[in-house]
Image: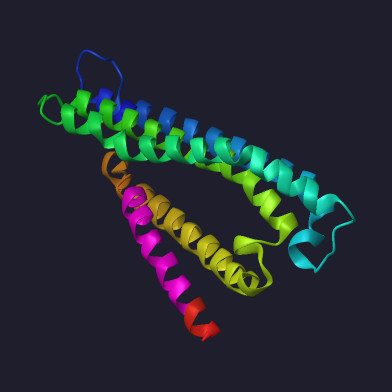
Amino acid sequence: MLLGAASELTSSGISENLAAGVGLAVLLVLVAVAVAIYISCGFGNAPFAFLREEEFETEYGVEGMVRERQRAYRSDYARGNILGTCCCILSPVALFIGSFSGDDFLTVAILCVTLLVAGVGVMCFITAGVRWAAMQRLLREGEFSAEDRGANRFKGAVSSAYWLVATAVYLAWSFLTGDWQHTWIVWPVAGVLFAGVMALCNLRGRRGDE
């Protein structure tokens, strides 16, 4: 997005083709890094897959130890969620301010900053939530309780399919039209719709329980 906006400035010396090529190359590099991290985490978690797929009983003293660590970590977990929420809520502020500048390049640059701040917020949610979820899994509480396990599998399948379809739509639209400066709108729209899809999944789960 930033390179595409820069290519429209005569003073930048960046052609539209160069901007699209470099931007796409960076995008693929980031995707490759993300996939490498995903695979690495998958291999690291493989020995503990039974915690997700099978019923288990913890050894004597383990539950008490986990609950103690959970109590000690609660403040850090709350802090991470508060920081992530604030970042996501405040991320559009810069965009609102930049939209009044009348400078297209500045507006796109600030949009990139907005997405970066939102990404930092998501990172806070993930880093705080992973440890908390691990402790809940061992204690079989919350979304890892026996009652919610089936619903979570369904939501996980829907979530995976949803984001794969969103990615396919984004890439197909971008490659067929070459309008990379505007196809990014797929992601905020997909993010908003995803909340609705998850709400429908939760509604389905409650009806199934009834």
Tell me the residue at 45%/53% (across/down). 167
Q: Is residue 181 left or right of residue 69?
A: left
Q: Is residue 114 left or right of residue 122?
A: left
Q: Residue 163, how many percent across, how many down?
A: 48, 57
Q: How many marks?
A: 0
Magenta range is 186-204
Q: Quadrant of residue 55?
A: bottom right
Q: Is residue 61 above or below residue 55?
A: above
Q: Residue 19, how many percent across, how many down?
A: 35, 27
Q: Main secondary structure of the magenta part?
A: helix
Residue 42 visible in this rendered orientation of the protein:
no
Tell me the residue at 28%/15% (across/down). 13
Tell me the residue at 51%/40% (across/down). 78
Q: Is residue 161 above or below residue 62?
A: below
Q: Nearer the viewer, residue 49 or 11?
A: 49
Q: Quadrant of residue 54?
A: bottom right
